[in-house]
Image: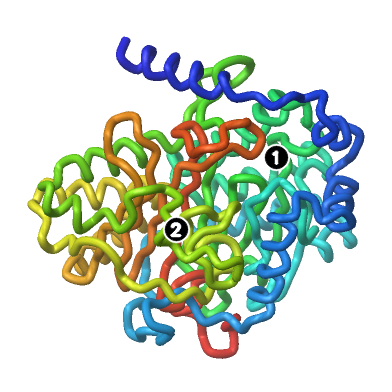
Amino acid sequence: MEQTKSFEKASSAFRKHFHDLSSPRFTTASKQNVNEYAKYFQDNHAPPWLYDLTQAWAKLYDEPFKGVTTDGKVRDGLFKSQDEGLEIDKIVAKAETLLGMLDGEQKKKMSYPGNAKEWRAWSNPEILLRPFGLRLEEVPEPTALAILALIESALSPAGYQKALAAMRINHFLGELVKLPQIMNKYSYNFLLFGIPSSSPSSPWGFLLYGHHLDLSVFFKGPQIVISPTFTGAEPNIIDEGEWAGTEILHKEGNLGLQLMQSLTPEQQQKAQIYKLLKDPGMKQTGDLLTDRWNKDDQRHLCGAFRDNRIVPYEGLLVSTFTSSQKSLILAVAEEFLLYLPDASRKLRLEQIESYFDETYWSWIGGYGDEDPFYYRIQSPVLVCEFDHHSGVFLANEEPKKFHTHTIVRTPNAGDYGQAIRDEKERL
């Protein structure tokens, strides 16, 4: 009964915020396919705030990969090659099945060297900025299903359902705003890196990217790295149609709020690095390479193309928490790392816990039950960011709890499996 009331409340909240779909923004887009939509964006620089950001992203993409750090210096010795018990043979079999379904041109389009720069080409807007790999909506249905089967084989069961939920909510949003050709369950690009192999000496992986879902997956024998990831939703529920009842990213928000509310007033004051979600104290000079806030990323620091960002520690040390509060940190981290297979996720959580003396919890915004907010968990081996956003396809000008973005980064060169790659295989 309580869950039903919560769902009804969430449905009512987002349905109060619809744009006029007869406006030029929507009527123009309704006549375009995804490639025409992207060309229109590039030719007209519209919206200008996003176009300007993509120009900053292009500069960041040109940088050699280094990794997210706190001070510009990568800390060595944090990650190691290990046997995680991953059922790599089953994953390789799914990859080989997919390859067997493709013709020569499709294989060429989908396949990249193991250290290709395109690992870093993901982005989360609905605009197809870089049309790499195979587009799921442009291949026959059996091929799209084979791509999904490969992804499913690599993720935990719960993680795969989370990915499906993000894709289905994207489809639902496309229906809500009458742009199904721009946003649907197959509006995603898939790239394969290296040659699928169960041998640790032949690492490989894949990238799935599109609106509100980006998954970078790296294999080294029976070891897996899923980082960076971006998972978002606008709205964060489906309240009608084929997938009615789907919801996403609520646990991350609820657990984070529970933790923040459990702190003492003194701890809350230290954790709350800004009181307002768009606080005057945030750097907002117009330099999109370095600003603390921009209209797309909003409070996020480690999103698309921020592979080398310097993010100093902020907030409150987790080592000062009670045992129950430390358990909440791990519960939050587990939700962010849900894509990892169970055994691998368990090892990651143990690693994260071992660095609690260097782990920080920070918060932006209020922490009442109805307040939208941002939080970050940051340590030498993990960055998790959670943010409530203003509307893009919905009309809320201020952040609301029904539009959510989440990001996972593995700092100190952990992203894309870089820290466990051999020198010749590095990005």
Seen at 72% across and 27% down, the residue is 177
What's the distance in space between the residues labelled 2 and 1, CA to CA?
Answer: 26 Å
Which residue is tagged 1?
145
Which colour style is shown? Answer: rainbow
Q: Based on the displayed image, in which of its 4 quarters is residue 92 positioned?
A: bottom right
Closer-to-camera residue (154/42): 42
Q: Which numbered disc, 2 or 1, marks the residue closer to the eye?
A: 2
Does the image show residue 194?
A: yes
Side (left or right) of 377 relative to 28? left
Q: Which mark is residue 408?
A: 2
Side (left or right) of 283 relative to 147? left
Side (left or right) of 128 relative to 321? right
Classify the position of the C terminus by image quarter: bottom right
Relative to 390, say whether 58 is above or below: below
Closer-to-camera residue (366/130): 366
Residue 404: give x, y in percent of width and height: 49, 41
Side (left or right) of 222 relative to 344? right
Specify the amino acid type for callout 2. Val
Residue 280: give x, y in percent of width and height: 43, 57
Residue 143: give x, y in percent of width and height: 77, 44
Q: Mark 2, residues whose alpha carbon is within 10 Å: few (<14), some, or many (≥20)?
A: many
